[in-house]
Image (tube, rainbow, N blue to C red):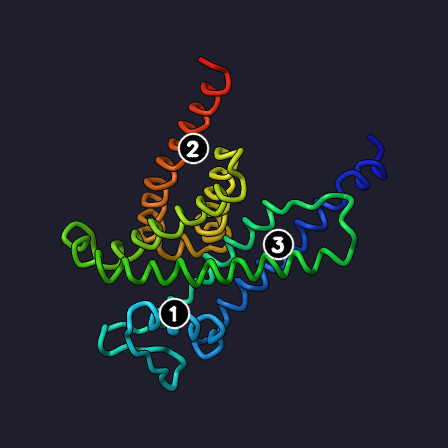
């Protein structure tokens, strides 16, 4: 295939990937360089959502953290859920794959829609993660170190939520939805630390996180394959 023809056939998809990747990198860079005071667009709504759901009262301190003394909760930079927002944004971009017939004015609208959906989903899922941590982390600490229990509950919240997002948008292709979700998670949470050198800085922590991730990724993939097999058998009449 000539280069010009190849480019014309794949131009929309390649440009969409480049735009989505640029936005994701910008979000990730903003999070890495930001202080809690720079993440109020995520922390403030999170505090308001938790207050509406639980009745806990949150107050902002001078550093930009949000604290509920009644619940013993402090929402710091690490609680913002930006990594999940990036994953959700990329998943929406994957599911809203561009068609060659898209007019140019739709591109920024679709990117903005993906960002908005990812932001809203990140708020809801992050609030659920915090509630689950408060409820179940003390019990998990009988078997895991506090940091490992905290990270495991985050993984058990974020990854199924990402897969559910894919299921809702790709109900006819559950295997594809789970593969996309798991691949995106592995790329951002396991691949990026390897490429950036973060894994080498603390190999034990990285190995523990990788083991926990695989322990959740593999059952999800198995469930997706089982669902796919059930659908195939039903449609084939066997």
Q: In this view, does 53 lie above or below 209?
A: below
The circle on residue 224 is 2
The one of 27 and 43 positioned closer to us in this rendering: 43
Residue 71 locus on image (x, y percent): 23, 73
Label 1: few (<14), some or many (≥20) within 10 Å? some
Indicate which label's residue lies in the foreground, 1 or 3.
1
Instruction: Tell me the quarter of the image containing the N terminus.
Output: top right
Question: Is 194 on the left or on the right of 216, as rendered?
Answer: right
Q: Mark 1 points at which residue?
A: 49
Q: Residue at x 51, y 37 (%)?
A: 171
Work out which residue is located at the far bottom of the displayed protein and give it. Answer: 62
Residue 149 locus on image (x, y percent): 25, 54
Question: Is 137 on the left or on the right of 223, as rendered?
Answer: left
Q: Residue at x 50, y 16 (%)?
A: 236
Mark nearer the N terminus (2 vs 3) = 3
Q: Mark 3 points at which residue?
A: 21
The one of 74 and 208 positioned closer to us in this rendering: 74
Q: What element carries label 3?
A: helix
Mark nearer the N terminus (1 vs 3) = 3
Instruction: Tell me the quarter of the image containing the C terminus.
Output: top left
In whole angstroms, how far apart are the C-alphas of marks 2 and 3? 26 Å
Quarter residue 211 falls in? top left
Label 2: few (<14), some or many (≥20) within 10 Å? many
Residue 56 locus on image (x, y percent): 28, 74
Quarter residue 141 falls in? bottom left
Residue contact between numbered discs 1 and 2, judged by CB atoms under 8 Å? no
Quarter residue 61 falls in? bottom left
How many marks on residues?
A: 3
Indicate which label's residue lies in the foreground, 1 or 2.
1
In whole angstroms, how far apart are the C-alphas of marks 1 and 2? 32 Å
Q: Is mark 2 on a helix, strand or loop?
A: helix
Q: In this view, does 114 lie above or below 210?
A: below
């Amino acid at each position: 295939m000539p280069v010009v023809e190849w480019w014309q056939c794949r131009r929309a998809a390649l440009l969409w990937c480049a735009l989505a990747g640029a936005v994701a990198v910008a979000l990730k860079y903003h999070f890495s360089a930001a202080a809690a005071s720079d993440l109020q667009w995520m922390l403030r709504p999170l505090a308001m959502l938790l207050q509406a759901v639980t009745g806990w009262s949150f107050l902002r301190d001078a550093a930009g953290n949000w604290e509920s003394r009644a619940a013993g909760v402090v929402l710091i930079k690490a609680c913002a859920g930006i990594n999940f927002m990036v994953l959700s944004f990329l998943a929406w971009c994957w599911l809203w794959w561009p068609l060659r017939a898209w007019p140019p004015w739709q591109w920024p609208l679709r990117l903005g829609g993906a960002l908005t959906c990812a932001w809203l989903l990140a708020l809801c899922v992050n609030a659920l993660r915090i509630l689950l941590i408060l409820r179940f982390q003390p019990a998990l600490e009988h078997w895991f170190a506090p940091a490992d229990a905290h990270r495991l509950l985050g993984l058990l919240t974020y990854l199924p939520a990402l897969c559910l997002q894919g299921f809702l948008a790709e109900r006819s292709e559950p295997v594809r939805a789970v593969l996309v979700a798991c691949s995106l998670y592995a790329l951002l949470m396991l691949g990026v630390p390897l490429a950036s050198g973060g894994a080498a800085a603390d190999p034990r922590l990285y190995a523990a996180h990788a083991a926990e991730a695989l322990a959740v990724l593999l059952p999800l993939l198995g469930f997706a394959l089982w669902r796919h097999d059930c659908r195939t058998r039903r449609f084939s009449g066997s």
